[in-house]
Amino acid sequence: MRRWRLILLGFGVIGLAYLVHRFLPTQHNPLRPPDLTEPIGLATYGKLTALKHNEKLCRETLQAAGVEFSVLPADGADVRCPLDETLVLKRSLTPYNAAPMRMTCHQMAALHIWERHVLRPQAEKLFDSPLRQIQTYGSFSCRNIAGTGVRSQHSFANAIDISGFVLEDGTRISVKEHWRERSKSGRYLARVHKKACRLFSVTLGPDYDADHADHFHLDMGSQETCR
Ligand SMILES: [Zn+2]
C-alpha cells in the first residue's frame, strides 16, 4: 500500500513539474531558451549569465531578436588586452551616437533587453515620445579600473558606459545633469538604472563614486554590484 502511495506521489510530482514547465511564461522559466523579445522575468538574468558559456546560442538569440552584428576575429594585436572573438553592433532598435561598439555576445544581449524593455517603453511612458538615440562613451577600451591595477571589464569588451538619451521630441536626458533631479528626466534615469541592475552583473552610476558622475557603467563580469 505504501509503495502505491509513493508511486502516485511520484507521478503527481512529475505531472506538476510538466504543467509548470508547459505553462510558465518563457521569461520566468529557466528551462526555456532565452528570447530577448520576451519581457524581463525571474529567469532573465540567469539566462543572460548562461549565454556567457554558449556563444552559438547567444548569437542565434540576438539574430532572432533582429539585432544585426558582425564578428571580429580573436585579436592578439594589443598584447595588453588580447580578446577572443567579439561582436560589433551594427543595428539594434535605437541608434547609438558612437561606433563601432565592440562587445561580447552576452553583454550585447543584456544591452538589447535593457534597450527594448526598459529604455524605449520608459521614454514612451514618461515623455510620451519615442527614444531617438542612446549616448555612450563606448564599450571596448584597454584600461584598468581608475586608481587600481585591475583590468576594467571594458578591456574584455564586456562593458559599456552610457551618458544619456535623446528623445524624438528633442528632450535630452543627461546622467551628469539630471541624476537626482525630481524632474521627469531624473525619474527616467532612476528607473532605467534600477532596471539595469536586473540585467547586468554590475551597474554603477553617480551614487557609486565621482568617476561615474556623468555615466552609467554596465558590465557582465563576474562581480555583482548595483549602485
Ligand atoms: Zn565603464
Image: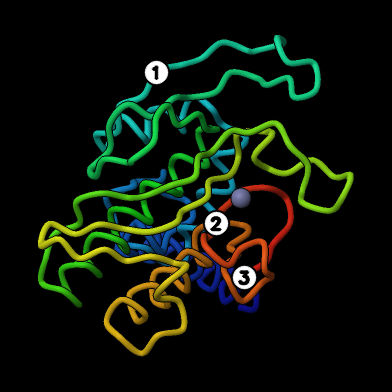
Asked if residue 77 lies left or right of residue 194, the reply is: right
Determine crowd level at label 2: few under 14, some 14-19, many 20+ residues with C-alpha closer than 10 A.
Answer: many
- Quadrant of the rendering where the C terminus is positioned: bottom right
Label disc, if present, on residue 226 of the rendered structure: 3
Examine the rendered structure and indicate whether residue 86 appears above or below residue 36. Answer: above
Residue 75 sits above or below residue 188 on the image = above
* Residue sitting farthest toward the bottom: 182
Q: Label 1 crowding class (10 Å Cα cut-off): few <14, some 14-19, many 20+?
A: few
**What residue does disc 1 label?**
70
Q: Quadrant of the N terminus?
A: bottom right
Which labelled disc corresponds to residue 56?
Answer: none
- Residue sitting nearer the eye, 118 or 131: 131
Respond yes or no on whether mark 3 lies under 8 Å from ligand 1: no
**Which is more toward the observer, 110 or 186?**
186
Give residue 177's position: percent from left, percent from top.
42, 72
Which of 129 and 55 lies nearest the eye of the viewer?
129
How does the figure colour the protein chain or chains? Answer: rainbow
Of mark 3 and mark 2, the one earlier in the sequence is 2
Q: Which residue is mark 2?
A: 200
Residue type for callout 3: Cys
Vertically, is 184 above or below 83? below
Q: Could you give the CA–CA distance between mark 1 and mark 3, rounded to whole angstroms?
A: 30 Å
Place of residue 154 in the rendered image (x, y in percent of width and height, measured from the top left): 64, 40
Question: Which residue is rendered at x = 30% and y = 61% of the image?
Answer: 119
